[in-house]
Image (cartoon, rainbow, N blue to C red):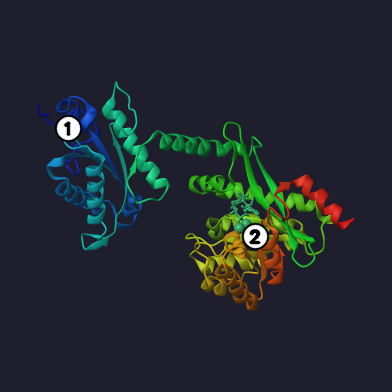
Amino acid sequence: MSRVIPTDNSLDNLTQLFSRRGLIDHLRTSIKRPDNLGIIYINVVGFRHINHIYGHDLADDLLKLFARILKGLVRQKGVLARLAADEFIIAITQVADLHYMSTLVERIDNAFRQPLLCQGESIALQLRFGMSANGAAPFCDDCPIESLLSQASLAAQYARSQDSSEAVLFNLEIERQLSRHSRLRHDLQMAISKQQLYLLYQPIIKTQTGDICGAEALLRWQHPTYGLVPAEETIAIAESSGLIEHLSKWVLANCLSWLRDNESDLPFGFRLGINLSAKLLESANYLAFCIEQISAVPTLGYALEFEITESKNFDNDTRVNDFMNALHALGVVFSLDDFGTGYASFERMQSLDFDAVKLDRSIVHMADQSSAGKHMITAIVALLKPLGMTIVAEGIEGNTQMDTIRRLKCHEAQGFWLYKPMLAGEFHALICQQTS
Ligand code: C2E
Ligand code: MG
Ligand code: MG
């Protein structure tokens, strides 16, 4: 096996590991075919923040320490490289079977579970792993090494997008999903001006009378290639690409314009629910926009409701309270959406001034399940009742669920069994039918 004499750009100055160029040159000369080659791609999540918080000097030392520990773990079994600040590669040239690669990843993951001590600071690193190997997916025959490197990088990108600490092995489905994601991310910029976005309105009824008392506005994106993009995917893309504020302003403006146009036909006390990304609760800019828009026609504030799903972004109660207080003053009410899933907590409910709570459909569906499920939903409603909030049951899909919700005296209900989300014009016609 001939040895590559490292030239200046074949080594990473900081860690003395191979650079990308150096790694490719080394692999080209040291292996005949990539049949035995496996790539593990390691991404240090949020390294930019470490740089920002602790400064470049410490961050550099941390990277050197990281590389040293990695070397100790990999030993002679693989070749190490650093491709960018926070991207490392292990090329396995001897025993590139997937079992070996997964075991190595596990060992690395375990080793970095403890924070690293660097310049007196204790710093926890979060790693994401992507893997590629011959046989896992076809690669380009002309440049098999580059091909495997980029496949492992895509797999790590996918692990990051899924927030998964498990190593992801590249396959063609991952490539398809990532390419859809980046296309959507790119296209969302123009979706508003190209009029590909619109809102559907799903009626909400009073449980005791069956009358429509409100609606929830639900975002839809008709993409020219991919068709209808699910709302949750659109919102996730908007949040991760910094477009959520722009998008949410568009939603609010549309809802206000619908309310303005139809105000005279709406039943007394009507509320239109707008889903609000928790990220925006801390945006002074978005709050100012809400105040300006809602104040333009003061009666409209009383027809608006913001639905907020508790999330990990939702952690500054003082700011959230300020946001809620400013809009409460204009007549707007707030509901805690998807109650009973993930982050819902009674502590939050106590500290924040919610006017309504929307029981997630997973709770509502307990009505159809075991007697334990029925007891659970009864207990949840009993617990919420004394808090004085309006209780809305979401996702009603059948008779039994509706009967239970009525018996438990939940105030309002929403679901496909009652009404599916519909176009603005259809919803207006439905309301007129009810009030005539
Ligand atoms: P959500 O706020 O909980 O909205 C209710 C979701 O449940 C909607 O899904 C609705 O179509 C669906 N749904 C209603 N009744 C039933 C039922 O009986 N059965 C079932 N299986 N589903 C039912 P959609 O429209 O796909 O929206 C999903 C989520 O996306 C929403 O959940 C909300 O969190 C988010 N979202 C939608 N529009 C917007 C928006 O304009 N802004 C923000 N930030 N989020 C939005
Ligand atoms: Mg909602
Ligand atoms: Mg919900």
Q: Could you say which quadrant of the image residue 353 lies in? A: bottom right
Q: Is residue 322 above or below residue 424?
A: below
Q: Secondary structure at mark 1?
A: helix
- Furthest toward the front, the residue is 370
Q: Check if mark 1's residue and mark 2's residue have beta carbons within 8 Å.
A: no
Instruction: Mark 1 or mark 2: name the one nearer the start of the chain.
Output: 1
Residues at marks 1 and 2, CA–CA distance in whole angstroms: 63 Å
- Furthest toward the right, the residue is 436
Residue 265 x/y as whole percent: 84, 55
Residue 113 x/y as whole percent: 27, 58
Residue 401 is left or right of residue 162, and the answer is right
For ligand 3, which image quadrant applies?
bottom right
The residue wearing badge 1 is 8
Nearer to the camera, 421 or 329: 421
Residue 337 is left or right of residue 403, and the answer is left
Quadrant where the N terminus sits is top left
Q: Is residue 15 above or below residue 306?
A: above
> Of tags 1 and 2, which is closer to the observer?
2
The residue wearing badge 2 is 394
Q: Is residue 329 visible?
A: no
Q: Amino acid at mark 2?
A: Glu
Question: Quick check: is the Cβ at mark 1 less than 8 Å away from ligand 1?
Answer: no
Quadrant where the C terminus sits is bottom right
Question: Quick check: is the Cβ at mark 2 less than 8 Å away from ligand 3?
Answer: yes
Taking the spot 54% from the left edge, 58% from the top edge, the residue there is 278
Q: Secondary structure at mark 2?
A: loop
